[in-house]
């Protein structure tokens, strides 16, 4: 079998794992490949890498978003929201309760009605 030349570098390729691999660039040739085939492999390789880059960028964006949500949850930790019925309008009243690391209330606001603004 005659040595395959890299169409890009004009150097002999070395056989490895059933293919001929260029020693100075990422191009490779499968048995029987023409120079055009070698260039096609290289184009496909670059396209695959570009797709991988996009996939990785998406992955990073997702991770950043997840991290932001977690950070917000951590920032809110130590505070819970309690609800009860409003005695005036029957709507829902809310208040925030600060808790210590054991979940015991340390400070709480008045209930404020979502419906009529009543405070108790
Ligand atoms: Zn080469
Ligand atoms: Zn109310």
Image: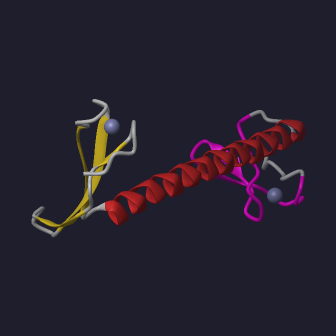
Q: Position of residue 15 (x, y in %)?
A: 65, 51
Q: Residue at x 76, y 51 (%)?
A: 27
The quadrant in which the N terminus is found is top right
Quarter of the image for residue 18 reads top right
> Which stretch appears magenta?
8-31
Q: Position of residue 105 (x, y in %)?
A: 14, 64
| Vertical relation: 4 (above or below) 89 | below
From the viewer's side, name the closer residue of 81 and 43: 81
Q: Residue furthest front?
A: 88
Residue at point 75% right, 55% down? 13
Ligand number 2: quarter of image: top left
Q: Is residue 90 magenta?
A: no
Q: Is residue 1 visible?
A: no
Q: Evaluate whether residue 33 shows in this view.
A: yes
Task: Quadrant for residue 10, please give it.
Answer: bottom right
Q: How would you classify the magenta stretch by its main secondary structure?
A: loop
Question: What is the x, y in percent for residue 52?
Answer: 64, 46
Q: Is residue 6 left or right of residue 69?
A: right
* Nearer to the camera, 103 or 3: 103
| Residue plotted at (67% across, 51% down) | 53
Q: State yes or no: residue 12 in magenta.
A: yes
Q: Residue at x 84, y 52 (%)?
A: 5
Q: Nearer the viewer, residue 42 or 66?
A: 66
Q: Is residue 45 above or below residue 85?
A: below
Q: How many marks?
A: 0
Q: How is the image coloured?
A: secondary structure
């Amino acid at each position: 079998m005659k040595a395959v030349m890299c169409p890009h570098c004009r150097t002999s390729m070395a056989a490895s794992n059933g293919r001929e691999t260029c020693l100075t660039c990422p191009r490779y040739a499968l048995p029987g490949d023409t120079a055009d085939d070698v260039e096609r492999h290289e184009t496909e390789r670059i396209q695959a890498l570009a797709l991988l880059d996009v996939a990785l960028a998406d992955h990073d964006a997702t991770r950043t978003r997840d991290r932001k949500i977690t950070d917000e949850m951590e920032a809110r930790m130590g505070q819970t929201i309690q609800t009860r019925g409003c005695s005036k309008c029957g709507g829902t009243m809310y208040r925030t309760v600060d808790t210590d690391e054991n979940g015991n209330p340390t400070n709480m606001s008045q209930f404020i009605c979502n419906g009529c603004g009543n405070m108790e």
